[in-house]
Image (cartoon, helix red, strand yellow):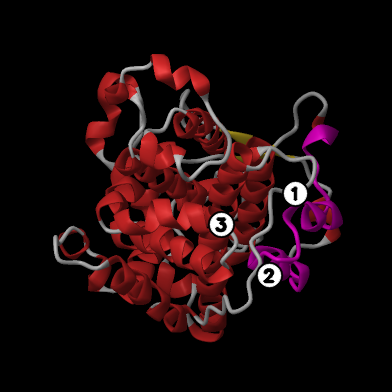
Amino acid sequence: MDQRTHSWIAIRAIALLEDENEERNLVSLLKPHASKASVGAWLPDQADMKRGGAGSMTDNHVLKMYPYKGVQADRFVVRKNELLQQTGSYRMMTRFLQTDNYLEDFWWETAFKGDVRRPGQHLPNRIMALTTIMKDLLLLGDQKIDQLIPGEVRFVEDMDPESRTNEEAASLYFFMLSHFVADVCMPCHCDGRTLSGYGNGLHKELEDHWSKKVGKQFEKKNMLRESLDSHQMLEFARDVDDKFCLNFKGTTIPDLKKGHDAWLEAIYLCRASFAVASIMAPYKTYSYEHSEATAPFDVVFGGDRRNMLAALDQTVLHDAVLNTAIMWKHIWNKVSKD
């Protein structure tokens, strides 16, 4: 996603938490900073984030799936029923795959392995690292954050108050995490075919399509206005729902799947995104072994496949918002309820 869409996803996730009304303290932390902290939602895509070799450009936020014929290939087979069980019925991506008839049994019995070109690109690793450090940063929070979290952290009395995490910084880190969670939901980030590269058409054009629908209100220059009210900002985010046929009414935000940590949850979501990519740009037309350089947007979503684009819009953006809220709530529960 681009800057507009990443900003909208994170702010819509705050609105989803507010509507659920279970984690009021988390909403109290994030909502006042919705506009300014939105910088965090798109910072990871900036070239300046590569200083020191960190490697944070768009093509580094990936877990590209390829057919695998190496040792212990059975480890990398995930059959349809297992994947649907691991991703959960509350996700649109699960429903999308459940009703699909294109990927046959042969596909589901094939081994696919996630790979990265360079160290630091691995999306689930990035998500796991951020969720881990954010728990510590919240426990080291300043007095305002400390008042939002039950219990007592006695050793902070020995810390310089200036070294404790403030609300603005904590909010920024939550928004940065939303960036990587959203990228997991973008099928091209999980598809190893050449056609899914950002500069090869389909990826960029799909993100441009979402950005135009999200609208100019979420453009950086509008997000960072001093006069922008947080209540109004959340309403703007809710107003986008109709453009993608999203319905969050009555949504319950679950914890991670039982037995999962953030890393394993992200691994299964990447696998689901890869399956969606293989339907979106049909793998029988655009094979894995002899990958075409491009899959033109107007061909992939042209003619009688326009319904595919509408279904993809709804699926990807619903889950990007929900998965962000799930990860945020998981972190908050770990520091406030465990």
Q: In this view, does 49 lie to the left or right of 190?
A: left
Q: Is residue 119 magenta?
A: no
- For label 3, count other residues whose C-alpha is less than 10 Å away and answer few (under 14), some (14-19) or many (20+): some
Residue wearing tag 2: 96
- Between 146 and 221, the residue placed more toward the observer is 146
CA–CA distance in space, label 2 to label 1: 19 Å
Q: Is residue 105 left or right of residue 312?
A: right
Residue at 22 percent across and 62 percent down: it is 223
User: Residue 130 shows which numbered tag?
Assistant: none
Q: Is residue 79 above or below residue 331?
A: below
Image coordinates of residue 179 in percent, x first then y, are 42, 48
SS assignment at label 3: loop
Q: Is residue 133 above or below residue 297?
A: above
Gap between marks 3 and 1 measured at Cα: 19 Å
The N terminus appears in which quarter of the rendering?
A: bottom left
* Amino acid type, mark 3: Glu
Q: Name the residue under label 3.
A: 23
How many marks the image carries: the answer is 3
Q: Sequence order check: which comes first, mark 3 or mark 2?
A: 3
Q: Please tell me which residue is depicted at 42% across the width and 56% down the height of the picture.
A: 28
